[in-house]
Amino acid sequence: MKIRITRDTKIPLVEKGRIFYVQGVSTTGDGETVYFIHHGGNYLGIRAGDCEVIEREPE
C-alpha cells in the first residue's frame, strides 16, 4: 500500500506531497487509523487524517 502525505507534519522530511510505502496499519483506541512507514531508519506512525491512500495491495 502507498500513501501520500496531504499536509505538512512535524516529522523532518515527511512533508505534504511525499509518497511512502506502508509497512503496517493499526487503529487507535479512538478508532483512528494509523499507517506505519519506514523512514530514516525508523518506523513512524502517520495518522489517516494526514494522508491519503493512493495504491492498495491486490486482494
Image: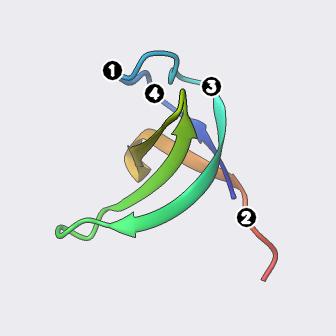
Q: Along the polypeptide, which appears first: circle 1 or circle 3? A: 1
Residue designated by label 4: 7
Residue, disc 2: 56
Q: Residue 50 bears which disc, if any?
A: none
Viewer-nearest residue: 18 or 45 = 45
Q: Horizontal and vertical percent for residue 13?
A: 52, 17
Identify the image quadrant of residue 26. Answer: bottom left
- Towards the viewer: 12 or 6: 12
Q: Which residue is mark 1?
A: 10
Q: Amino acid at mark 1?
A: Lys
Asked if the residue at tag 1 contacts the one at tag 4, i.e. Cβ–Cβ closer than 8 Å, the answer is: no
Q: In the rendered structure, which disc, 4 or 2, sits on the residue that comes first in sequence?
A: 4
**In the rendered structure, which disc, 3 or 2, sits on the residue that comes first in sequence?**
3
Marks 3,2: beta carbons within 8 A: no
Q: CA distance from mark 4 to mark 1?
A: 10 Å
Left or right relative to 26: residue 56: right
Q: Secondary structure at mark 2?
A: loop
Give percent across and percent down for residue 4: 62, 38
SS of the residue under disc 4: loop
For image coordinates 62% across by 25% down, the residue present is: 17
Mark 4 or mark 3, earlier in chain: 4
